[in-house]
Image: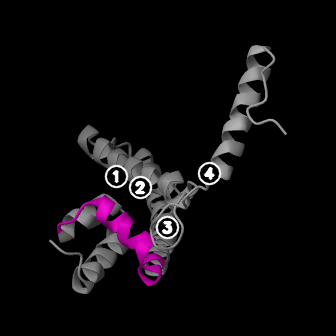
Amino acid sequence: MRFTAERREIYIAHLIATGDKGAAAAEVGVSTSTVDLHIRNDPVFAQVHREALDDCYVRLEQEVRLNLAAQARLRTAREAAGNSPPLALLEEEGAEFDRIMKLLARFDRKPHRPQSRFKPGGRRQAWTFEAAIVRLDKALDALARKTGKPRQPFVEG
């Protein structure tokens, strides 16, 4: 299955509606790794994806505030009337609230580390031999400091 422009639009619409990247990808029949690949390789899609997440984040925050206010009013009204809500209703409200809070927490995180290692175009930057030797030398120095044993220089000069 290809992640065509039409499928991307459906994905973005579902992402805005639910805030769930996995569910939105499943809706169009692709995996989240396919979505991540397109985010890395297509700067326009990456921008649209970021904007969709921003819109969804704002909507979820507003929804949480409204739900909390409505729950407080409902609880106050039930306590004033002397009625207690059915246990199933409380569990259902709690489960939905937990789902929204998990989504908000996910949006608050920093960008995922695997995405930050890629340069535009989706490829890792190739190391030169000299850069690899310098990196190896630093790692060996750190290991020597950690163990307390002196080490011979890797490269003389």
- Residue 103, placed above or below residue 98: below
Quick check: marks 1 and 3 in contact, CB under 8 Å?
no
Q: Nearer the viewer, mark 2 or mark 3?
A: 3
> Residue at position x 72%, y 36% from top?
137
Question: Label 1 sits on what residue type?
Answer: Glu
Name the residue carrying label 1: 96
> How crowded is the residue under tag 4: few (<14 C-alpha within 10 Å), some, or many (20+)?
few
> How crowded is the residue under tag 2: few (<14 C-alpha within 10 Å), some, or many (20+)?
some
Alpha carbon separation for disc pair 2 and 4: 48 Å
Mark number for residue 57? 3
Alpha carbon separation for disc pair 1 and 3: 16 Å
Per the rendered image, the range of residues in magenta is 29-46
- In-image side of 96 versus 129 (left or right): left
Mark number for residue 129? 4
Quick check: marks 2 and 1 in contact, CB under 8 Å?
yes
Q: Where's the C terminus, which quadrant?
A: top right
| Residue 107 spot, x, y in % from top left | 50, 59
Q: Nearer the viewer, mark 1 or mark 4?
A: 4
Q: Nearer the viewer, mark 4 or mark 3?
A: 4
Secondary structure type for disc 4? helix
Mark number for residue 100? 2
> How crowded is the residue under tag 3: few (<14 C-alpha within 10 Å), some, or many (20+)?
many
- Residue 42, placed above or below residue 97: below
Q: Residue 44 lies in magenta, yes or no?
A: yes
Alpha carbon separation for disc pair 2 and 3: 10 Å
